[in-house]
Image (cartoon, grey):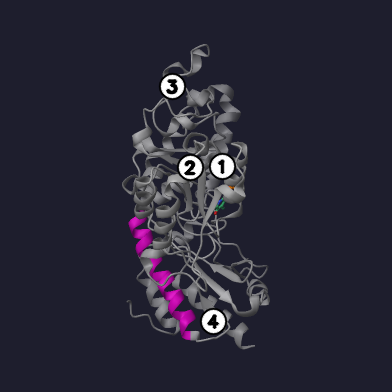
Amino acid sequence: MTNFKLGIEYAKDQDLHDPLAHYRKKFHIPKNSEGDEWLYFTGNSLGLQPKETKNHIKQELDDWANLGVEGHFEAKNPWMPYHEFLTETMAQIVGAKPIEVVIMNTLTTNLHLLMVSFYQPTKLKHKILIESDAFPSDRYAVETQLKFHGFDPSDSLIEWSPRKGETLLNIEDLESILESQGEEIALLLIGGVNYYTGQYLDLKKISQLGRRKGCKVGIDLAHGVGNIQPNLHESGVDFAAWCTYKYMNSGPGSLGGIFVHERYANDQTLKRFAGWWSQNKATRFDMRQPLDITPGAEGWQLSNPPILSMAAIKASLELFNEVGMNALIKKSRLLTGYLEYLILELNNKDISIITPTDPEQRGCQLSIQVKNANKSLHTKLTEAHVITDWRTPDVIRCAPVPFYNSFKDVFKMVEKLKNILNA
Ligand SMILES: *Cc1c(COP(=O)(O)O)cnc(C)c1O
């Protein structure tokens, strides 16, 4: 345990010795009308804009203006292979091989496309298991996949829930569900880091438990990517999908990414939906060739991608590439540990933290449960320009992001929280 200390001097000193402190200047921090920077703790929902993003997008606008269609091959960053410029760094961030990763579409769309391949129910093995507090979009996606295949979610959708009176998931409970119903379960689709509690699950263990029972295992990494190191390849999961507008700082609604384990890289028998971007690059523009799926994750692409969104992702990935996940996670653990320490020091009975205390079981987000679901605490924080988010029924999510949040941010945030609680 780090020896955190109370008082602003400690925060200032930590910032002074923070090797990543200068990255804050590379982001636009929103300000109030007096010009004071907000205390922004919502990078888990929409990451802040890197200052470099504008230049990256402008480059593509200029190349389009000056080159028209020739930009596909002649642009500074040719649009034809543009997605390839993103793959290597993206793969490192999620602990995958480049052949296992591609940037394409948006998250929920990708979950559906991946389920086309990895949810192949039979009469006996047709159930899907999700965590009980799955993100609504994921739940709607699996419910409609079940219905699409003629199954009734009330029979075929299985929930992994926390035990009575608890808020976090216990892997032993997953184990017993798989023991009793594993033969009927076709797919596990689990949020790697839960959006509500911030709990980071043991992906390797989930993968082993599921695959041992012949289930496919998919992970939603929306709250994991750029936050924790999921080591996807090593974990052995079959597939994963994520968005890039949360911790990946690539702009509202920006494209998502997928991972498909290398074991499927050359599997042409998997069912899938295809488009011209799934086609082998050598013959993609012959147009009259029969479908010949390109190897690896790229074979799940359908369309030529929106370059302006890709440019924003490229700008962000360059920062990630420079810093690396190890350094980010190192700072993240300190920063979140510090936030946790300061909140616990408040010793206030109206709030409690439901996120795991073990740094191995969480990323940067802390979920603060508010007594009696008193939403006014969140409203008052917002009025004080402390940007967090409220999730029903009773949680304030608060994510100090190592790229741009400082120890001073955390200190000031808890001071404001204290004042509001004591008022
Ligand atoms: C943010 C988030 C989504 C959002 O899906 P989009 O398709 O990008 O709108 C879905 N699932 C989870 C778990 C999320 O955290």
Residue 61 placement: quadrant: top right
| Residue 286 visible here | yes
Say which amino acid is labelled 4. Answer: Glu
Q: Mark 2 against mark 4, which lies toward the viewer?
A: 2
Q: Which residue is drawn at 37% across and 61% down?
A: 329
In the rendered structure, which disc, 1 or 3, sits on the residue that comes first in sequence?
1
Stretch in magenta: 324-345
The local crowd at label 2, few if under 14, some if 14 to 19, many if 20 or more residues have their Cα within 10 Å, is: many
- Residue that badge 1 annotates: 106
Question: Magenta stretch: dominant SS?
Answer: helix
Q: From what the image shows, is residue 211 above or below residue 38? A: above
Give SS at disc 1. loop
x%, y% of residue 335?
Answer: 42, 70
In the displayed image of the protein, which residue is found farthest to the top?
Answer: 288
- Residue that badge 2 annotates: 257
Q: Mark 1 against mark 4, which lies toward the viewer?
A: 1
